[in-house]
Image (cartoon, rainbow, N blue to C red):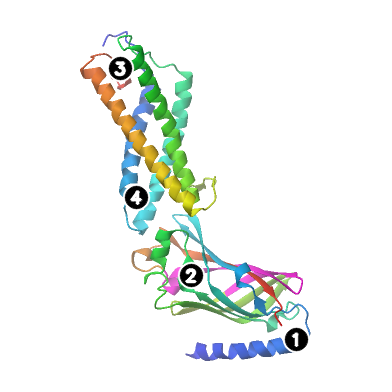
Amino acid sequence: MKNCTILALLPALGLLGAAASVASAAEITAVAPDKSSIGFLIREMNVPVSGRFGKFAVQVSFDPAKPEAARVSIDVDTASVDAGSDEANDEVVGKGWLNVKGFPQAHFASTSFRALGGNRYEAAGKLTIKGHSQDVTAPFVFVPQGAGGTIDGSFTLKRADFSIGEGSWSDFSAVANEIQVKFHFVAGAAR
Amino acid sequence: MTAAAPRYTATAITLHWLLAIGLVSIGAFGVYMHGLPLSPWKLRVFSWHKWAGVTAFLLVIVRLGWRLTHRPPALPTSMSPATRFIAHVGHAMIYVLMFAIPLSGWLMSSAKGFQTVYFGVLPLPDLVSHDRVLGNALLQVHQALNIALAVLVAGHAAAALRHHFIDKDDVLARMLPR
């Protein structure tokens, strides 16, 4: 519950950040969902298998000139998962994997941003999947384009931290523990 | 069988029987694993099937190379020209299928988005990209080619037994280990 209180404050902080940098031309506030993607890569018998989430919502406030003031909140519709095949999709929506009925949303809320030099940045925040929360940091590249730009980055999560793949799947010899999450956002200044 | 009867080379005999045992086993494995519900076990056996298939494919390449550079003993003259022609066509079709089947499996793996990584170490290039419709089509092709090979191999074995027990010639004996 403590986390929830902090998370509830984040949009307010984000607004403050946005207000403070309203004069900046390059501030990103809107992400085009149809041009953006959230994908993942998981090793099955050491074979890299890629998948994606088709439905997600991103709320962002990012000014490359003031990255420390940036905020992002991402809601992913877990039922929109595509794990690469019909057979895998039937499996991963179930209780042992994502349990999309019990946990229809996965959530990421940033807690801090920092510049890594050049057009590279890093977002730190709390990732919540299936009722489990973990701190994650995701480096990304921001490429300005017109009034907006593209954000590309990735991070690796351990599925066991989120009880993704329970029972016989909790053995990592067939399906690895590490899942690489890759995101590509096409963003613009909406206002 | 007379002592002077021409035989296949020891290499040809070894490759023939290695592939006979290997291909029947891999095929039977394929039938078994196809019906499995998704589980870590299924992921394992699919990988084993693919590794075995790649190994068989390599053996088939060696075997074709040997076959092209080492003329096999001629079929007995007691066979009619038509029967000999059928035998040659049958053998050629088995060779074609021994290439086409692992190739179709390789392509199917790529199309289904599950790359073949030989022994979990060596990734084979994806010759086609991830495409669900193509993947299902290639599954049908892989199955149909295997049914064709099973029919040909059954005919091949029946013919060999007929040569041995009815025609009483050396056609089977010359492919058996001494």
- Residue drawn at (63%, 76%), measured in percent from left and top? A123
Q: Nearer the viewer's eye, disc 3 or disc 4?
A: 4
- Residue drawn at (68%, 77%), measured in percent from left and top? A114
Q: Which residue is mark 3?
A: B171
Q: Are labels 1 and 4 assigned to the same chain?
A: no
Residue situated in front as seen by the camera: A57 or B2: A57
Residue B57 forms part of the magenta stretch: no
Q: Which numbered tag is attached to residue A22?
A: 1
Subunit ID for the residue under disc 3:
B
- Residue A163's quadrant in the figure? bottom left
- Measured Cα–Cα span from mark 3 to mark 4: 36 Å
Q: Are labels 4 and 2 assigned to the same chain?
A: no
Classify residue B110 as left or right of residue A68: left
Q: Which residue is mark 2?
A: A80
Q: Which residues are magenta?
A: A137-164
Q: Which residue is mark 4?
A: B34
- Measured Cα–Cα span from mark 1 to mark 2: 34 Å
The disc labelled 4 sits on which kind of residue? His
Q: Are labels 3 and 4 assigned to the same chain?
A: yes
The disc labelled 3 sits on which kind of residue? Val
- Residue drawn at (46%, 23%), measured in percent from left and top? B66
Subunit ID for the residue under disc 2:
A
Classify residue B94 as left or right of residue B154: right
Q: Residues within 10 Å of mark 3 (few under 14, many from 20)?
A: many
